[in-house]
Image: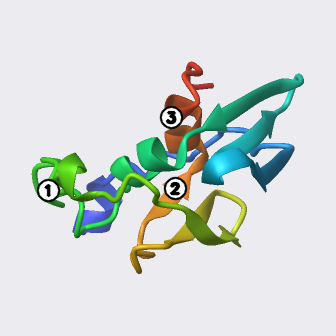
Amino acid sequence: MGLLDRISFKQDTTTPPERIELGALGALVIEWPGGTHVAIPALQLRDQCPCASCIEEGTGRKLLDPATIAPDIRPVEVKGVGNYAIQIQWSDGHGSGIYTWPLLRRASGLAPE
């Protein structure tokens, strides 16, 4: 039995949003199934970037200091990643974070599915 035979790969079953748009002041406006609309401020979303530059991979410890994020941070581009996430290019040049549907639900203040 190899290592991969012993690892359990959990499938993500979070339903994708119905729509994602850029709102006022760069907020991400998300419409979730069932009609729930949520606006996540750009600064809050940038602070939750899950990439290896912002979160230590081995421990999950946050590396990004929120004080270093410009108060006028804005998404420059938002693109889909498969059917499980979006990737945001930020006005500060950062763009390696992949925001999965579960992460966006948490950022929206919604319970996981």
Q: What residue is rendered at 42% in x and 54% in y? A: 46
Mark number, residue 63 = 1
Instruction: Tell me the SS state at disc 2.
Output: strand
Cα–Cα span, label 2 and label 3: 10 Å
The quadrant in which the N terminus is found is bottom left
The spot of residue 40 in percent (x, y) is 59, 38
Q: Residues within 10 Å of mark 3 (few under 14, many from 20)?
A: some
Between discs 1 and 3, the one toward the N terminus: 1
- CB within 8 Å, label 2 to label 3: yes
Q: State the image quarter where residue 87 is shown.
A: bottom right
Instruction: Tell me the SS state at disc 1.
Output: loop
Between discs 2 and 3, the one toward the N terminus: 2
Q: From the viewer's perspective, is the residue at label 1 or at label 2 nearer?
A: 1
The spot of residue 100 in percent (x, y) is 55, 52
Between discs 1 and 2, the one toward the N terminus: 1
Tag 1: amino acid: Leu
Q: What residue is rendered at 21% in x and 58% in y? A: 68
In the displayed structure image, the side of residue 21 where residue 43 appears, left or right: left
Which residue corresponds to mark 3? Answer: 107
Cα–Cα span, label 1 and label 2: 17 Å
Q: Residues within 10 Å of mark 2 (few under 14, many from 20)?
A: many
Could you say which is closer to the camera, residue 38 or residue 71?
71
The spot of residue 60 in percent (x, y) is 17, 48
In the displayed structure image, the side of residue 29 where residue 92 appears, left or right: left
Cα–Cα span, label 1 and label 3: 18 Å
Tag 3: amino acid: Ala
- CB within 8 Å, label 1 to label 3: no
Tag 2: amino acid: Tyr
Which residue corresponds to mark 2? Answer: 99
Q: Residues within 10 Å of mark 1 (few under 14, many from 20)?
A: few
Q: State the image quarter where residue 96 is shown.
A: bottom left
